[in-house]
Structure formats: C-alpha cells, structure tokens
Image (cartoon, helix red, strand yellow):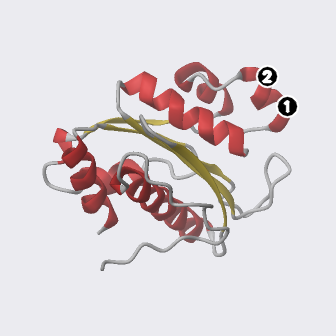
C-alpha cells in the first residue's frame, strides 16, 4: 500500500506530512490515516475546495488564481508549499484538477495537477486521467501518494531525472 510505504519513508527521514486537497476532497488524508501509527507522521490535511480558500488557508497567490484559475501547475506547487507552512509539516502534498463531468477553468475533465514539496525537492506532475468522477479522484489521490513516495524515498542529492509524462506507477520490488 503506497500510503503505508510513504509514512514509513517519511518516518525514516524524521519528516512529517501535511496534505492540501481540492478535487480529492480528503481522499489522500483518509488513505494516510487508515494506516496504523499515521499520527506519528501526519500533521493534518486541508480540503480547500473553494478557490478563495486556496488563497486564504494555503497562501496561494490570489492574482495567480484570478489569472489562471485553480487548475494549474503553479497553483498546485503553491498549495504543496502552503500546506507545509499551514500544518508545520516537512512535506506537503497537493491535488487540484477537474473531476468532471464538466470542464473548469478552461481545463477538461480528467486534467489533474499533483504536487509535492519536501525540504530538498519539489515536483508537480500533470495527470490526464480517464473515467468518471470517482475514478479521477481515486487516481489523483494515488498519483500524489506515488509522487510523494518517490520524492521522500530518494537519497539526499539523488536526481531521478525528468519526471514521467504519463501517469506514474510505483510497484513493489
């Protein structure tokens, strides 16, 4: 289970986690709290579904939100950084996107941005997901957990290279 592996990797580094969610509406945080002992690592989560809450609670630049909308790579990055501040966590995870069925902010259903910010690296991935609302939100939650696991698990200074352009799969080895 990715959530358990992420919590173990963060604990091994002495890091805590905070989560900022929009389209996933708490699914990421729920996945983490379902793991026994999560309270040793998870600081908390913020569901900022409304655009104004992204600015007010997470510190996302209001001008950026007005210009580009909430479904944007830079917004996801600022959400991940902002939740670190809001929760006092070492690692911030963020999700924003369009679960559908209708487009939003000029983006089609299934366009999702997931972001992770750590003390040593930050990354944002665009995911182009298929399926209904529940499938898109589930895949978005899995996507941010997998990205976080990859970043938290890597050794300091390790460079994984260019992030994949397709939906990443993390498998047990």
Does residue 100 lie above or below 118 as drawn?
Answer: below
Q: Secondary structure at mark 2?
A: helix
Residue at position x 31%, y 59% in the image: 3
Image marks 2 and 1: residues in contact by CB distance under 8 Å = yes
- In-front residue for pair 49/166: 166
Quadrant of the snapshot with the C terminus: bottom left
Residue 167 coordinates in the image, percent (x, y)? 59, 71
- Which of the labelled discs sits on residue 63, or is there none? 2
Above or below, 78 relative to 127: above
Left or right: residue 139 versus residue 127 is left
| Mark sitting on residue 33 | none
| Label disc, if present, on residue 67 of the rendered structure | 1
Q: How many other residues sit within 10 Å of disc 2, few (<14), some (14-19) or many (≥20)?
A: few
At 55% from the left and 71% from the top, the residue drawn is 135
Toward the front, the furthest residue is 157
Of helix, strand and loop, which one carries label 1? helix
């Amino acid at each position: 289970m990715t959530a358990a592996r992420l919590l173990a990797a963060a604990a091994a580094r002495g890091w805590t986690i905070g989560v900022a969610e929009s389209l996933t509406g708490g699914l990421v945080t729920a996945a983490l709290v379902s793991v026994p002992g999560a309270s040793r690592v998870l600081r908390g989560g913020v569901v900022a579904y409304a655009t104004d809450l992204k600015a007010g609670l997470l510190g996302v630049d209001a001008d950026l939100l007005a210009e580009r909308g909430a479904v944007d790579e830079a917004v996801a990055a600022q959400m991940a950084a902002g939740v670190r501040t809001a929760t006092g966590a070492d690692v911030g995870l963020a999700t924003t996107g369009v679960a559908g069925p209708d487009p939003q902010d000029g983006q089609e259903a299934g366009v999702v941005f997931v972001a992770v910010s750590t003390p040593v690296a930050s990354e944002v991935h665009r995911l182009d997901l298929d399926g209904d609302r529940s499938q898109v939100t589930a895949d978005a939650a899995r996507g941010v957990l997998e990205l976080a696991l990859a970043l938290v698990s890597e050794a300091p200074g390790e460079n994984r290279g260019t992030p994949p352009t397709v939906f990443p799969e993390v498998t047990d080895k």
